[in-house]
Amino acid sequence: MKTSLDEMAALVAVVDTGSITAAAEALQQTVSGVSRALARLESKLAATLLRRTTRRLELTEEGAAFLAHARAILAAVDEAEGQMAARLQRPAGRLRVNAASPFMLHVVVPRVGGFRARYPDIQLELNTNDSLIDLIEQRTDLALRIGPLRDSTLHARPLGRFRLRVVAAPAYLKAQGRPRSVDELRGHRLIGFTAPEHLNQWPLRGAHGDSLAITPAVSASSGETVRQLALAGEGIACLADFMTREDRARGDLVQVCPRDTVEVLQPVHAVYYRNTALAARIQCFVDYLAQQLAEIAE
């Protein structure tokens, strides 16, 4: 008797979520139903796939080997269904998107309405995380990442690039004075990042070269927090244009040391785990976002 897609999906869900109970919730099934599916699968394969302990479930060697095939089969079925939906020009299904909170707030959220109007059958699930995530572990279809990519296991599509600028609120510059040179910045309150450290390298030329290593007076893990601190007049910050474009247009933030600024463009990529063509719902979102970013990216 051949194994079924539901049985494979049960195994994948249990491994990804870490328990039968969590898998049942993710699959919207009963715990007993998932347990029976696993039992049928092991019976059909005449092999133990999961080793059950009092604390957790562990894949056996046979389970790990079968899991890889199960993932590929489920992905192929998902892709086939997505392509069929695309033929009907009605891509459908849940799409889980992850991005750093500033990019989500300033770039993705303002464009959700336009995307949903074009693809009403796609259910968007938007999650934010300011650090790198494991796409499979976080059950994410697509991540939007800013900066150079380091994970060679990811497939990626470039979406655009955004210039970095050093900015401050007019109220801060009025109270503390506008720095007339890069050297004068050292006497000002600088707002930086807790991590990664390269974000505290500002694109300013001087005797130090084309990159100035700053020592922040206050640091934050999120770019949106850095932006809010700058808007509140707490100091000078270095941020990407996608965060400050409207602030600068309104005059709420102004560029500092523009003549000494080196052109540094931060790339934005859509990244995903796929060995085949993208599912239609992912392809639609990536294409839509790329089109939108072409209008605002440098």
Image (cartoon, rainbow, N blue to C red):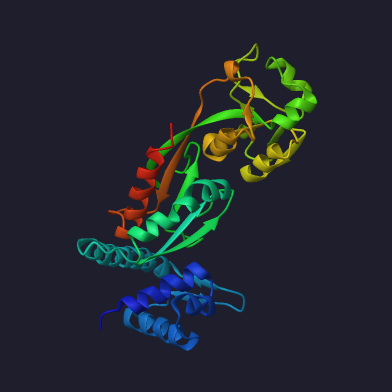
Quarter of the image where one finds residue 195: top right
Is residue 156 visible in the rendered structure shown here?
no
Location of residue 220 with respect to 51 vertically, above or below: above
Identify the residue at the far front of this view. 250
From the top left corner, tell me how far across and down residue 294 is, in percent: 38, 38
Quadrant placement of the C terminus: top left
Number of marks drawn? 0
Q: Is residue 219 left or right of residue 127?
A: right
Image point 74% across, 17% down: which residue?
184
- Comparing 77 with 58, the one in front is 77
- Comparing 44 with 18, the one in front is 18
From the top left corner, tell me how far across and down residue 25 is, in percent: 50, 78
Location of residue 262 with respect to 136 vertically, above or below: above
Location of residue 164 with respect to 209 vertically, above or below: below
Is residue 183 visible in the rendered structure shown here?
yes
From the top left corner, tell me how far across and down residue 295 is, in percent: 39, 38
- Comparing 22 with 115, the one in front is 115
Image point 41% across, 41% down: which residue?
293
Q: Is residue 281 left or right of residue 17?
A: left
Quarter of the image where one finds residue 87: bottom left
- Comparing 193 with 231, the one in front is 231
Location of residue 264 with respect to 53 vertically, above or below: above
Identify the residue at the far top of this view. 207
From the top left corner, tell me how far across and down residue 62 is, in percent: 40, 69
Q: Is residue 107 left or right of residue 194?
A: left
